[in-house]
Amino acid sequence: MVREMNSQWEKYLESTYSGQPIQGVSNEWRPPSCALMDLSHLGLIQVTGEDADTFLQGQVTNDIRELGDENFQINSYCSPKGRMLAIFHAFRHAGALTLQMSTETQSGILERLRKFILMAKVRIDDASDLIVKVGLAGTGAESLLQQHFTALPDQPGKLQHENGVTVMRLPADRPRFELLGSTEKMIDLWGAFLPAATVCHPDYWSLLDIRAGTPNLYNDTAELFVPQMTNLQLIDGVSFTKGCYTGQEVVARMKYLGKLKRRMYLTRIQAGIDFCPKPGDELYSSTSASGQGAGKIVDARPSPDGGCELLAVLEIAAFEQDDVHIGSTSGPKLQLMSLPYEFESH
């Protein structure tokens, strides 16, 4: 389900642009020194009440007890079979535990979490229309923010709260920040950021996630992967010491008893194609050990350098043979790239 944007925020953006085009990610497009993006494609769930931490601790893969007022974490929610239903960022905003994920998965997770409340003193709300989300990225992002905030998070995974606005620093190949706050506060900030920042399409935000090796989950990829297949354990998205949670037995077995046969890689498709694959699209290899597809697309976006950049969960054997294609074993070949983090040694 695609939800409607906060109407007040939407009207503000429409009046600001007056039909002017927003810069979109495309081949030969060059990102500005400070890109400003509306992140309404991300949904929010807030969990409140005296049992909020305890309740969520029993549902998700990461350790909620390690979530303070100055950090956030990547996290996931699994089915009993250990397959991920959502990947999200967890943090505290305005006194509430807040989960941010794709709007495609948000409504289903909201409904599912509510089913497990039982006697817990917990309230679970859709906060997507109450909190506006804005992204800034580029070499000029930090200096621009310093004009409006007394302190900024100094490394990815950290956040700061000031005057009702939460500022998060995310991993990327350039400085990248997300700001969350009320519609009124974010309208003021958006206007203050212009004209120093250039308004860009949120596809650029997704491209920066891809380059950072940070997976997102959508309807077409829900329940396809256990966390380790998308490298979640390598970016501190899984705790193996926190105790029980939904799907924990399968996730733990993969670590201690299983052999990981598929993992996520950063790849690209050469320039000259006229399409980008979609999340969940099948990948193929003539060397596939399974006799089926060699992997699935996690996410893909057009590249300013031509073609597409993408994250893909691949058979490790097919990756090592450098023989992975889209559409068929004779389709466009994936060019393998380096992730910004290392795989664990075995």
Image (cartoon, rainbow, N blue to C red):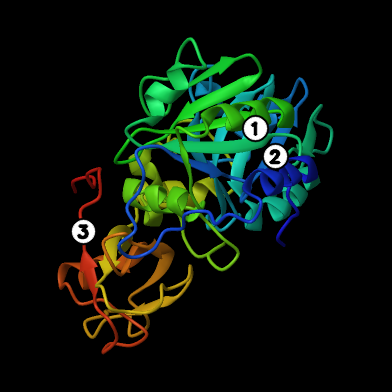
What's under tag 1, amino acid-wise? Thr
State the mark number for residue 98: 1
Place residue 275 in its image quadrant. Answer: bottom left
- The answer to whether residue 316 is left or right of residue 152 is left
Q: Distance between the residues labelled 3 and 2?
A: 34 Å
> Quadrant of the image for the N terminus?
bottom right
Please rate how many residues cluster around mark 2, counting C-alpha atoms within 10 Å: few if below 14, some from 14 to 19, many from 20: many
- The answer to whether residue 331 is left or right of residue 13 is left
Viewer-closest of 184 and 198: 198
Residue 3 x/y as whole percent: 74, 55
State the mark number for residue 337: 3
Residue 332 x/y as whole percent: 28, 81
At 60% from the left and 31% from the top, the residue drawn is 191
Residue 75 x/y as whole percent: 51, 40
Please rate how many residues cluster around mark 1, counting C-alpha atoms within 10 Å: few if below 14, some from 14 to 19, many from 20: many
Place residue 171 in its image quadrant. Answer: top left
Nearer-N-terminus badge (2/1):
2
* Name of the residue lying farthest toward the left: 321
Task: Answer above or below: position of 96 versus 218.
Answer: above
Q: Does the residue at mark 2 contact the one at mark 1 (Cβ under 8 Å)? A: yes
**Mark 2, secondary structure of its residue:** strand
Regarding residue 259, the answer to whether it shows in the image is no
**Mark 1, secondary structure of its residue:** strand
Residue 140 x/y as whole percent: 36, 30
At 41% from the left and 62% from the top, the residue drawn is 301
Q: In the rendered image, which residue does mark 2 sit on? A: 45
